[in-house]
Image (tube, helix red, strand yellow):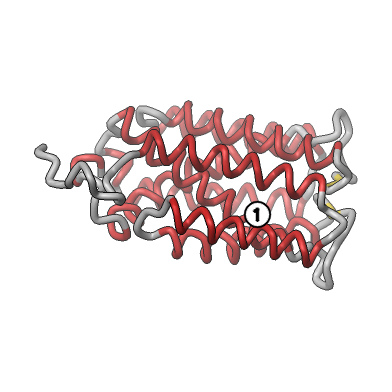
Amino acid sequence: MTDTTSAMDPHRFRPGRDFFVELGFYALCLLCAGFLRAYDPYLMALLFTLIVLKELYWRTPGDGWFIAGGALFGVGLDLLFVWRGLHSYVHVGAAGVPLWSFAFWSVSVMLLRRIVTYVDFLSAPDEQTRLFAGKAGELVIFAVLSAVLWFWRPGEVMSAACILAALLVRLAAVRESGDTVVFLLVALGSAMTASFFVARHVLAFPHSEYAAVPLWLPLFWGYFALLARRAIRPLEHRLNPVVPFAYM
């Protein structure tokens, strides 16, 4: 497929560089959150200022939608986790989550977008998992797993076993090139982020039995990344006009 974008176009398709820039930016925001956790309003202002500055110098079409959607969706999940007692923040806002979490979830979702785009670019995903039935099945399984964690709360080992069993069934039924990479990157990244936040007294997991971070956490977010991969792909194609159609 012929690339019609100019070499000087600042919005040309560049998934590798976008991924590494976003990864470095995520690490910077993670350090800010870890060391400035007690200064909630100022940390929120700092993180949103950093986001604006990054967008001024390194922007791609559709960023605003992912930033806003990531903030609302992520904080919504955060509130559910806090409400069901799965984790808690040491320094909290009025609703049980700090204000800076809006900005941090925006950064996290942007990094997830870059992971999906880069892995898809490298792995040339198969056609079969673009079917609606596959996406609907992913959503149903994730909804069931979320309900198990939020309402049944069977214990750390049983929760991890449920997610692992669902993951194995899903990979056996529908799997495409790059799924393992996406899962591992997000699972390891979520475990490292949560471990850092626990060490810095940002987060606490009251029902963690074997380590500072519960066993189900990396499995849950890794599985979430597989679902997000199916959702991000069509959004990327609609919002970013320079993405080659063949990539979709």
Which quarter of the image is occupied by the C terminus?
top left
Locate residue 59 relative to residue 159 in the image: left or right.
left
Q: Residue 224: x, y in percent?
A: 55, 44
Which quarter of the image is occupied by the N terminus?
top left
Locate residue 29 relative to residue 66 in the image: left or right.
right
Locate residue 93 relative to residue 216 in the image: left or right.
right
Q: In the image, what residue occupies the spot 47% across and 59% down?
A: 66
Q: Is residue 48 above or below residue 109?
A: below
Q: In the image, what residue occupies the spot 75% across and 49% down?
A: 33
* Residue closer to the observer: 216 or 44: 44
Q: Is residue 91 above or below residue 25?
A: below
- Report the residue that reaches farthest toward the left: 2
Locate residue 212 relative to residue 173 in the image: left or right.
right
Res 240 quadrant in image:
bottom left
* Residue closer to the observer: 179 or 201: 201
The kind of secondary structure element at disc 1 is: helix
